[in-house]
Amino acid sequence: MVVGRGMCLTMAGLTIGTMGTLFLTRTLTSLLYGVEPNDPATLSLVDIVLVLLSLAACVIPACRAISVDPVAVLRAD
């Protein structure tokens, strides 16, 4: 559940960010050297890296939470 919600937020952010990048290509042209603003390989690589980082950021805490005994947590309070 945690990973699913995190990935939904990631996909929404990537969609908005990619659309923003495509709409602001004229502004970005002066900042890019050796790469075109609408280069699909670059945009895809950045999206893949961000998805993998987001997946790791969601999975690691979820695995740590799964390993905790719920009875011990309830008795601690």
Image (cartoon, rainbow, N blue to C red):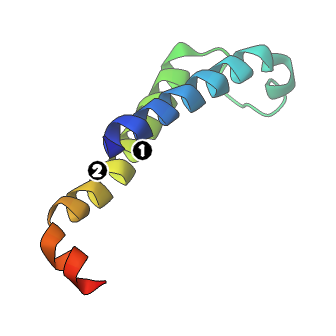
Q: Where's residue 72, x and y in %?
A: 16, 78
* Rendering quarter of residue 66: bottom left
Vertical order, 7 against 39 (above or below): below
Q: Which mark is residue 25?
A: none
Residue drawn at point x = 34 percent, y = 35 percent = 4
Say left or right for 12 vs 57.
Answer: right
Of residue 17 and residue 63, the one placed in the foreground of this image is: 63
Task: Count residues near mark 1 (Cα–Cα under 10 Å), then give few for <14, some for 14-19, many for 20+.
Answer: some
Between discs 1 and 2, the one toward the N terminus: 1
Residue drawn at point x = 14 percent, y = 72 percent = 71
Give the CA separation, mark 1 to mark 2. 9 Å
Say left or right for 30 vs 67.
Answer: right
Vertical order, 25 against 5 (above or below): above
Q: Quadrant of the C terminus?
A: bottom left
Q: Furthest residue to the bottom?
A: 76
Q: Which mark is residue 59?
A: 2
Vertical order, 59 against 76 (above or below): above
Of residue 43 and residue 66, the one placed in the foreground of this image is: 66
Q: Which residue is mark 1?
A: 54
SS at mark 1 in the image: helix
Q: Where's residue 54, x and y in %?
A: 42, 44
Query: From where the camera sits, is residue 69 visible?
Result: no
Task: Count residues near mark 2 (Cα–Cα under 10 Å), then give few for <14, some for 14-19, many for 20+.
Answer: some
Say left or right for 22 vs 66.
Answer: right
Mark 1 or 2: in front is 2
Of residue 66 and residue 17, the one placed in the foreground of this image is: 66
Give the amino acid type for the residue marked by disc 1 in the picture.
Ser
Q: Where's residue 30, x and y in %?
A: 84, 29
Q: Quadrant of the N terminus?
A: top left
* Rendering quarter of residue 17: top right
Give the amino acid type for the residue marked by disc 2 in the picture.
Val
